[in-house]
Amino acid sequence: MTVKSQRKIRWINDCNCKVDEFLLTKASLWKSRKPMVSIKHIYKFGNYAAVTIDGRKIHVHRLLMEYELLNNIPITFCVHHLDGNKMNDSIDNLAIMVSGAHNSHHMNGHVITDKQREMILKANHRRKGMKIQRRVKVPLDELKVFLKDGKSINWISRHYECDWATIKRRIHENPELLEAQHDTRTD
């Protein structure tokens, strides 16, 4: 449906959040690049009230704060609900905070259980394996011999107990290894 001129927007509050609909209308029109349909829904997205503007979901509290500042809020900032009620999106209940301070505020006095600590350790352990790669010295002469013998990159990476990307990077850093690899393919 194409809207050519903007009519008054009527909000259907599906999630029963507390919001100033007049201010929400002004903020939505400010954020939108084109006229909007006359009936809009406020729905729950995650734990927060949200609306759709130009095909994108946006949380109401963030939209209202961006309109209040007349600027987009960087991802490094959060919009905090002062009374702790995530469904209270009145502008008096919102404050902008740096993400780190916002997380500290919510975690203040929070005690982590042994089960939570164990889950965090497991998650960090899995993450470390992907992010941090061990440095492996791969001798060029040995690598050249393996490539001439027709060994695959996976075989070589298992031989040196490293990631295949390490071997691939080493080959591309040294053009003579690329020639050795191509020689085996033409034979």
Image (cartoon, rainbow, N blue to C red):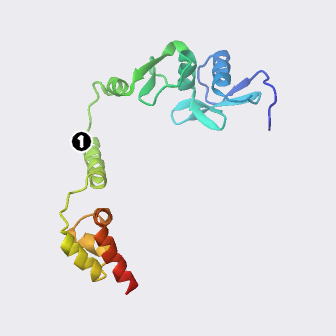
In this view of the protein, can residue 88 be seen by the observer? no
Instruction: Give me the residue at 60% from left, 19% from top.
Output: 19
The image quadrant where one finds the C terminus is bottom left
In this view of the protein, can residue 100 be seen by the observer? yes
Mark 1, secondary structure of its residue? helix
The x, y position of residue 171, in whole percent, is 30, 67
The x, y position of residue 21, in whole percent, is 66, 18
Q: Of residues 121 and 79, which is closer to you in this image?
A: 79
The x, y position of residue 102, in whole percent, is 37, 24
Instruction: Give me the residue at 53% from left, 25% from top.
Output: 72
The image quadrant where one finds the N terminus is top right
Q: Which residue is mark 1?
A: 114
Find the residue positioned furthest to the top.
Answer: 92
Q: Of residues 85 and 5, which is closer to you in this image?
A: 5
Find the residue positioned furthest to the bottom.
Answer: 187
The x, y position of residue 13, in whole percent, is 66, 27
- How packed mark 1 is, by other alpha carbons closer than 10 Å (few <14, some 14-19, many 20 or more), is few
